[in-house]
Amino acid sequence: MSSHSVEDIKQHSARLRGTLLESLANPITGALNDDDQTLIKYHGSYQQDDRDIREERRLAKLEPAHSFMVRTRTPGGVVTPAQWLKLDAIAVTFAERGLRITTRQAFQFHGVIKTELKATMQAINAALIDTLAACGDVNRNVAVAANPLQSQVHADVHAQAAALSEHLLPNTRAYYEIWLDEERVAGSGSEEEPVYGANYLPRKFKIGFAVPPYNDVDVFAQDLGFIAIVEDGELLGYNVSIGGGMGATHGDPETYPRLGDVIGFVAPGQVNDIAVAVVTAQRDFGNRVLRKRARLKYTVDDRGLDWFKGEVERRASFALSPARPFGFVHNGDRFGWVDTHGSANDGGHAHLTLRIVAGRIWDRDGATHLSGLREIARVLEEADAGAQFRLTPNQNLVIAGVPARLRERIDALVAQYGLDTHVTATPLKRNALACVALPTCGLAMAEAERYLPEFTDKVQALLDANGLRDAPIHLRLSGCPNGCSRPYLGEIALVGKAPGRYNLMLGADHRGQRLNTLYRENIAEAQILEALDPLFGRYGAEREVDEGFGDFLVRTGTVVPPRPAIPLQLQTENAA
Ligand code: SRM
Ligand code: SF4
């Protein structure tokens, strides 16, 4: 990799252009020049290689099997059936392993080769979707509560989040020039970056909007969270939380997962201003020397929450109002059909949430999910009734706004293509998350996505044996401590340490308000199952009514968790 620091590369990149055009044109290698490997992230892509065959290729003296992951910027993960069909065609033409729903409501394509990267980007653009700022030291895809229940408020919150995503886009035209052949305009005065500055942010930045009582976006895992405060069906504004983040490095106490702190309340009209104030404060005070300490969570801890809040208010030129009470009941998805008959916005429509295991939509072994969703998209496009696909931050899929007359047809297609695991799978399997990990993720230390089905089968067998078949336990699997499946918010989580070895984390709640804690370090599957079995036994025998597994472990002193995210005075009853 490059010997230049990321800060140097950004600064000397001519606003994220670098030598990307030359790199793409170089026929000798499937890779990019070193510095361009950093810059391409801001355009929504990562250079990767197939780690399954890395060693084999090294021995054969071949360069690694390079390819690119491409990630969309789709705030709240909303696309139309027509867009779905276009994304599906891109997956079939240019990518391997279909479409991948991410934990931030984006699509990822894996395995795109360099010579087809530009065509892929252009095809995404032709679907009226972009990939700008999907990765890199900028604001990433904005996550938004996924289910369009109580639809007017959800529509309002989604619109707010999409507008904020636009507001925080970098101004550089590099993306349009490199991928879409826009001509470069001399002077580049319009490329000034009043929010980001010449060096962009010290690190990635993430924003999420939650609509209580559901916390499907895991709002406290975001650098900046907005929690909608709704009264009598009206959106009053948002509580603001800052300083969430999951990533850590094994064995380095200077890095840690952290839940956001609620610092106050803003009206809808103040959202963009407060976001810009937080982003620019992080831009100016975030750690640009140590990347592992560069996220907002560390800036907040290093400077102090009160100091940071004061700085944000100074920049926004207004004071935050006191935070309002709110309550979360759940951070998972609600599966199956949800009827919204009679609601003001979309009378006579319903929404179907499908379980997509680890977010991977592809055709294999009789489970032809990509084909099935293509058929569903065709039906919805033809009906032209305003239905949408909405990706959830739990890697699942909502088919939203389905007219009553189409329900039977959709149900038939769901069954025909094996898309009905929301009905057939147990709650454990429905709620489990896994990050991508091997073979594409360059940082993976252990399997995650590929291991999830086998691992959940084994945990399920233990639950069954303990009379807990339908226990709705949230299980999350990450291939390394970066925490892309937000594992530190799992009631049970595995965090990869080495091939076949994981840290076992236990004790988060199922509302995204309490982190879990390390229970056993660096153990293999047999030991993990051995550790879980007696805990399930006790849970089955001693749990209180409706008590979650994580809550049980904490109440019984089996694990001692870090502090909860929300001060008690802010929690309404349904959060208890
Ligand atoms: Fe992530 C890096 C995949 C959500 C924390 N993440 C990566 C990379 C790009 C590996 C790399 O840097 O080379 C992974 C690419 C794997 C691949 O082959 O596709 C990767 N992250 C993902 C996705 C696809 C996981 C998934 O299974 O869905 C998610 C894409 C989200 C999106 O659409 O934008 C994804 N990553 C997350 C989340 C969850 C979230 O945002 O809600 C987190 C934890 C929250 C946070 O940021 O703290 C997360 N990813 C990281 C980190 C640790 C960052 C840190 O500052 O601590 C890294 C490593 C890094 O940035 O250096 C990372
Ligand atoms: Fe890769 Fe680690 Fe993220 Fe999993 S958690 S996708 S292994 S960086």
Image: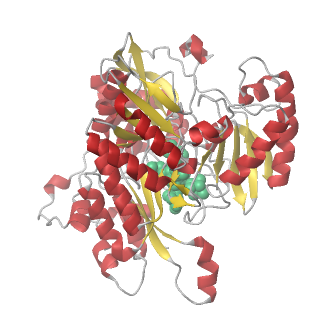
Vertical placement of residue 282 versus 470, above or below: below
| Residue nearest the observer in this picture, 187 or 62 | 62
Q: Quick check: 124 left or right of 392?
A: left
Vertical placement of residue 224 versus 111, above or below: above
Q: Please, which colouring scheme is shown?
A: secondary structure
Query: Could you tell me which residue is drawn at 55 percent across and 12 percent down?
Result: 572
Vertical placement of residue 470 versus 443, above or below: above
Query: Could you tell me which residue is drawn at 24 percent across and 62 percent down?
Result: 174
Query: Can you give x and y, in whole percent of width and height, for residue 29 in the image?
Result: 42, 83
Q: Quadrant of residue 149?
A: top left
Quadrant the C terminus occupies: top right
Q: Quick check: 349 left or right of 256?
A: left
Query: Could you tell me which residue is drawn at 20 percent across and 55 percent down?
Result: 191
| Residue nearest the observer in this picture, 186 or 393 | 393
Q: Quick check: 63 left or right of 168?
A: right
Q: Is residue 291 visible?
A: no
| Residue nearest the observer in this picture, 457 or 523 | 457
Task: Single out the residue that lies furthest toward the left.
Answer: 186
Task: Single out the residue that lies furthest toward the bottom.
Answer: 61
Query: Can you give x and y, in whole percent of width and height, for residue 549 in the image?
Result: 74, 30
Q: Is residue 400 visible?
A: yes
Vertical placement of residue 54 versus 527, above or below: below
Query: Can you give x and y, in whole percent of width and height, for residue 284 in the image?
Result: 38, 44
Query: Can you give x and y, in whole percent of width and height, for residue 196 in the image?
Result: 31, 48
Q: Quick check: 452 left or right of 346?
A: right
Total marks drawn?
Answer: 0
